[in-house]
């Protein structure tokens, strides 16, 4: 029964915590696993990490004492400590981009009941001269569709708090907690703290804008190049460039990706490898255009694929030539002197010997 007897309620909470510790730990792990699965399979949202924790019982009592006790006792409102600790079970989702926070919230809303919501992003952005921690906090409980499932039924009485924030917001939260004095301080020092917080906010915004600009660059390349193929003199095919807008464009990662995806439709090109490989090409030939690269591939890939078939059949170690290695051979075949560094000495010797026999 609720009361105003702090000592009694404190001991009751300790008894509750100790007698339910295994169940609380199980609920914490279960909620984290479920949320990880839902986010990973619902949308393509890049996540930095998902972590969980069960709040220490003495920390819960200290929080209640500082945050709730005085107000409840001054209004003569009976209480039970556990009912006030909404973050006894806590989950934190750290994503990359601020616009993904709302997407994650929508995913969770389809599978959990939202008891309360604290939008610290709107709170900060609604003021003109205030900067600080931003993030979305939700108090949740298992949704109706899962409450009768055996694996969740025993956890239906447990609410939990989830914090959704970006990497930048999470970093600022850590630093903000280390700044011991933030309110009753000289205005010059407060201004410096606000400036630092504003830089974090700007970084978050720019990170999102860079993502959007990157997506637009990729879309622009898609629009510029015609979705048809043509056969060259050696029988290979490749994407036809739109000569009006893109044939003279310098090769960059986006143009490279568009072209190689035509030649290797089933291969998953990793972004960072595409970026590094394109830079390697441009370092050797700074003036290479998308049209140039496209032509080098179309003119040479048929011959290189013949060599690939020979090489893989002859390989005693079952070594394969992946798309990046095939591209290296195409560039080397186009200009052996310029692209000499693209193959190892052993690879060049083996390829050259095969070319002599199959010219």
Image (cartoon, rainbow, N blue to C red):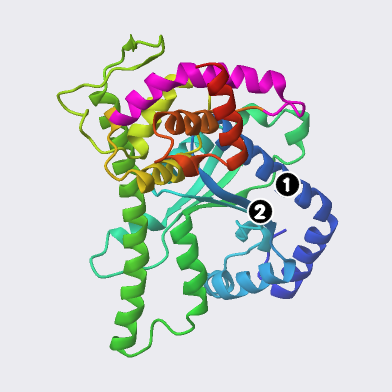
- SS for dot 1: helix
Relative to 25, 310 lies left or right: left
Spot occupied by residue 163 in the image (x, y as percentages of width and height) = 53, 53
Main structural element of the magenta stretch: helix, strand or loop?
Answer: helix
- On screen, 102 above or below 204? above
Is residue 38 visible in this depiction of the protein?
no
In the image, 351 versus 4, the foreground residue is: 351
> Quarter holding the N terminus?
bottom right
- On screen, 235 above or below 263? above
Q: Is residue 301 magenta?
A: yes
**Magenta range:** 292-319
Give the CA separation, mark 2 to mark 1: 7 Å
Circle number at residue 52: 2
In the image, 69 versus 239, the foreground residue is: 239
Spot occupied by residue 164 in the image (x, y as percentages of width and height) = 50, 51
Residue corresponding to mark 1: 29
């Amino acid at each position: 029964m609720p009361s105003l007897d702090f000592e009694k309620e404190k001991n009751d909470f300790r008894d509750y915590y100790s007698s339910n510790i295994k169940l609380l730990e199980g609920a914490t792990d279960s909620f984290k696993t479920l949320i990880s699965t839902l986010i990973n399979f619902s949308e393509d949202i890049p996540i930095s990490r998902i972590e969980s924790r069960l709040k220490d019982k003495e920390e819960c009592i200290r929080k209640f004492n500082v945050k709730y006790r005085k107000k409840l006792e001054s209004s003569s409102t009976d209480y039970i400590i556990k009912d006030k600790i909404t973050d006894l079970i806590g989950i934190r989702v750290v994503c990359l981009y601020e616009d993904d926070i709302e997407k994650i919230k929508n995913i969770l809303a389809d599978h959990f009941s939202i008891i309360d919501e604290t939008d610290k992003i709107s709170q900060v952005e609604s003021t003109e001269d205030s900067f600080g921690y931003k993030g979305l906090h939700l108090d949740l409980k298992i949704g109706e569709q899962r409450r009768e499932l055996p694996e969740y039924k025993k956890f239906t009485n447990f609410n939990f708090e989830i914090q959704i924030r970006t990497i930048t917001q999470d970093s600022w939260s850590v630093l903000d907690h280390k700044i011991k004095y933030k309110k009753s301080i000289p205005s010059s020092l407060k201004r410096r703290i606000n400036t630092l917080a504003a830089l974090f906010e700007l970084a978050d915004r720019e990170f999102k804008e860079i993502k959007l600009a990157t997506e637009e660059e990729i879309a622009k390349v898609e629009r510029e190049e015609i979705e048809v193929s043509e056969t060259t003199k050696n029988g290979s095919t490749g994407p036809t460039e739109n000569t009006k807008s893109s044939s003279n464009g310098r090769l960059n990662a986006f143009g490279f990706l568009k072209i190689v995806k035509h030649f290797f439709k089933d291969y998953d090109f990793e972004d960072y490898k595409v970026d590094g490989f394109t830079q390697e090409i441009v370092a050797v030939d700074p003036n290479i255009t998308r049209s140039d690269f496209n032509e080098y591939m179309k003119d040479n890939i048929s011959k290189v694929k013949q060599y690939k078939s020979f090489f893989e059949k002859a390989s005693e170690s079952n070594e394969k030539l992946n798309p990046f290695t095939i591209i290296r051979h195409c560039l080397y075949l186009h200009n052996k002197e310029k692209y000499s560094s693209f193959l190892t000495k052993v690879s060049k010797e083996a390829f050259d010997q095969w070319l002599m026999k199959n010219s």
